[in-house]
């Protein structure tokens, strides 16, 4: 039976305290107890349904976590104040001094910086590999390797991870497979394909309105309990707690994610096909020219398409900047980092979201100065958008 992530979200029913159609927001930092014994039990983790302190959890955060776990098909989830506030505790919870991580070489710049520059302080080393080369992945494993980390669809090069086969490698060597699924919510369900832990930056497509920063870790009840443990839980002790008001806001927006992802994907595929026909070097998983097109098709929940992210290479940073500035001037989108907004967002990742990666490593992985990353918006008339974009490209000299 096919996995239906949007149905799983829809089937959750919450009522507010007074019968509201949205759950009530728990606007408290601390919670009262009717007995001292219950407070003690809650500190020890032995009192289900009781709340201790909002850094640990809140009803609003648990509602959102439950919905996201339902979407990803995991036992439970823990929400955090940012995407990095989800990624960093997971890796610190799974690894200690002298441990080793294998990571995809193309990942979000903040994650790369954490693994490359910050984790060595704890004597935790990372090998960055071509995640699409399964032989290289397996050959990088050492006796100290604990985690295999990658993104379903990588930022910004849109490489696609073979999650099923990576899961087989992880299980064979007793590793945890951690997947950042930020670029492909609903389209890909990593836990169903064998991932142990699924992470999202909720800031992006899931929230969808570029007004909130948040993250989530989806996994087993045991692992989430470990993250929240008051004695040695990385999420609890590092303190990247989501605010209840933000959790309630994201939960409302999550209800329309399935509609938004369908439109993002529809518009993304339309533009990618047009750009490729125009002779632009275009990367989009929905194009047959994408090296992992068939792999994506084999993993995807087809009704949500290939996502809203695409890249084009216009040859130089000067042309990229000129084109983005002109498109913004013509109200075709915003020159801004991040993704998943109703409006198209574009940036040159080599000098923005991937700037933490040294220039020589950018070149090695194929991240050129002329690359523009697009997060395609929800435009109702995408044909008009394309025609206007094409005029901008002609004016800048990208197209003739």
Image: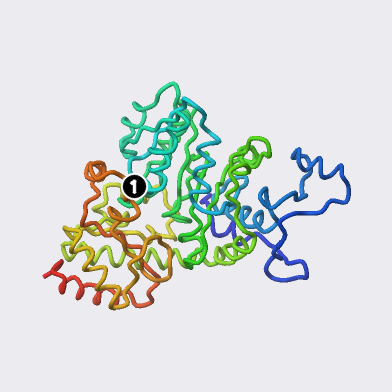
The x and y percentages for residue 241 are 60, 52
Query: Residue shown at 32%/56% (left/top)?
Result: 352
Q: Secondary structure at mark 1?
A: loop
Query: Residue shown at 53%/33% (left/top)?
Result: 94
Hey, which residue is sitting farthest right in the picture? 35
Hey, which residue is sitting farthest left in the picture? 400
Residue toward you, 42 or 387: 42
Looking at the image, residue 281 lies above or below residue 292: below
Query: Residue shown at 47%/66% (left/top)?
Result: 210
Hey, which residue is sitting farthest top in the picture? 143
Location of residue 36 by image quarter: top right
Please indicate whether residue 101 sits to the left or right of residue 275 in the image.
right
Looking at the image, residue 41 lies above or below residue 284: above
From the image, tell me which residue sits under label 1. Answer: 356
The x and y percentages for residue 80 are 57, 51
Q: How is the image coloured?
A: rainbow
Residue toward you, 257 or 322: 322
Residue toward you, 112 or 296: 112
- CA neighbours of label 1 inside 10 A, class few (<14), some (14 to 19), many (20+): some
């Amino acid at each position: 039976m096919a996995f239906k992530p949007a149905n799983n979200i829809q089937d959750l029913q919450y009522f507010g305290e007074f019968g509201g159609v949205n759950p009530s927001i728990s606007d408290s930092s601390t919670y009262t107890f009717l007995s001292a014994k219950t407070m003690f039990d809650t500190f020890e983790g032995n009192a289900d349904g009781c709340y201790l302190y909002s850094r640990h959890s809140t009803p609003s955060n648990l509602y959102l976590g439950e919905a996201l776990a339902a979407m990803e098909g995991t036992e439970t989830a823990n929400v955090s104040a940012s995407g990095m506030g989800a990624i960093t505790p997971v890796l610190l919870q799974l690894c200690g001094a002298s441990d080793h991580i294998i990571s995809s070489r193309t990942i979000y710049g903040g994650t790369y910086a954490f693994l490359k520059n910050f984790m060595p302080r704890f004597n935790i080393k990372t090998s960055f590999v071509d995640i699409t080369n399964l032989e290289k992945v397996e050959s990088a494993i050492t006796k100290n390797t604990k985690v295999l980390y990658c993104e379903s669809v990588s930022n910004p090069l849109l490489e696609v991870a073979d999650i099923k086969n990576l899961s087989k490698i992880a299980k064979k060597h007793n590793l945890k497979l951690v997947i950042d699924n930020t670029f492909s919510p609903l389209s890909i369900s990593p836990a169903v394909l064998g991932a142990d832990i699924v992470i999202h930056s909720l800031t992006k497509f899931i929230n969808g309105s570029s007004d909130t920063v948040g993250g989530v870790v989806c996994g087993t009840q045991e692992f989430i309990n470990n993250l929240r443990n008051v004695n040695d839980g990385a999420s609890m002790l590092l303190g990247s707690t989501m605010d209840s008001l933000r959790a309630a806001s994201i939960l409302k927006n999550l209800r329309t994610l399935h509609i938004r992802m369908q439109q993002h994907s529809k518009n993304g595929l339309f533009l990618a096909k047009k750009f490729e026909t125009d002779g632009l070097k275009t990367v989009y998983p929905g194009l047959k020219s994408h090296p992992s097109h068939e792999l994506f098709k084999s993993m995807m929940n087809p009704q949500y398409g290939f996502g809203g992210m695409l890249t084009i290479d216009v040859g130089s940073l000067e042309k990229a900047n000129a084109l983005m500035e002109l498109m913004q001037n013509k109200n075709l989108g915003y020159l801004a980092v991040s993704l998943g907004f109703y409006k198209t967002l574009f940036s040159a990742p080599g000098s923005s979201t991937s700037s933490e990666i040294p220039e020589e490593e950018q070149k090695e992985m194929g991240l050129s100065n002329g690359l523009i990353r697009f997060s395609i918006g929800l435009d109702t008339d995408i044909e008009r958008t394309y025609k206007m974009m094409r005029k901008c490209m002609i004016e800048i000299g990208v197209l003739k």
